Image (cartoon, rainbow, N blue to C red):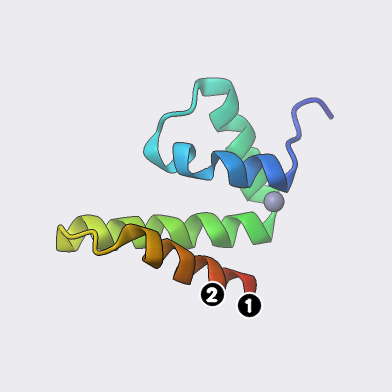
Amino acid sequence: MASQIECEEAVAKLLEFLDGELDEGDRSHMERHLETCRGCFSRAEFEGRLRALVAETGTAPAPESLRLRVRGLMERF
Ligand SMILES: [Zn+2]
């Protein structure tokens, strides 16, 4: 049980996870959570794709408003 994390924690650590900034323990907790939680998996996939897209175009237009729009989209899922 101690090795299971909640969605709240997974979401809070998602960006660090995608950036590869988590330490080994946190990362494996995240991976385990994403394997068993469809909601967080979708979110991670979405965020990851978004970042790849931004990296590809080499532009980060108004990251804050983009982030808010994305958040709005996610909430409608
Ligand atoms: Zn979750």
Residue 60 x/y as whole percent: 23, 59
Quadrant hosting residue 28: top right
As drawn, is 15 to the left or to the right of 50?
right
Q: What amino acid does circle 1 point to?
A: Arg
Q: Residue, x 75% and y 27% (percent of image)?
A: 3
Q: What amino acid does circle 2 point to?
A: Leu
Q: Secondary structure at mark 2?
A: helix
Quadrant hosting residue 53: bottom left
Q: Are marks 1 and 2 in contact (CB under 8 Å)?
A: yes
Q: For the residue carrying disc 2, how many other residues have a C-alpha within 10 Å: few (<14), some (14-19), or many (20+)?
A: few
**66 or 2: nearer the eye?**
66
Cα–Cα span, label 1 and label 2: 5 Å
Q: Residue, x 71% and y 47% (percent of image)?
A: 7
CB at mark 1 closer than 8 A to ligand 1? Answer: no
Q: Residue, x 63% and y 43% (percent of image)?
A: 10
Q: Secondary structure at mark 1?
A: loop
As drawn, is 7 to the left or to the right of 41?
right
Up the image or down, 19 lies above or below 54; here it is above
Looking at the rendered image, the quarter that the N terminus falls into is: top right
The residue positioned farthest toward the left in the image shown: 58
The residue positioned farthest toward the bottom in the image shown: 76
Q: Residue, x 63% and y 71% (percent of image)?
A: 75
Residue beneath disc 2: 73
Up the image or down, 44 lies above or below 28; here it is below
Residue 20 x/y as whole percent: 40, 33
**11 or 40: nearer the eye?**
11
Residue 3 is tagged as none
Q: For the residue carrying disc 1, how many other residues have a C-alpha within 10 Å: few (<14), some (14-19), or many (20+)?
A: few
CB at mark 2 closer than 8 A to ligand 1? Answer: no
Residue 76 is tagged as 1
Residue 17 x/y as whole percent: 48, 38
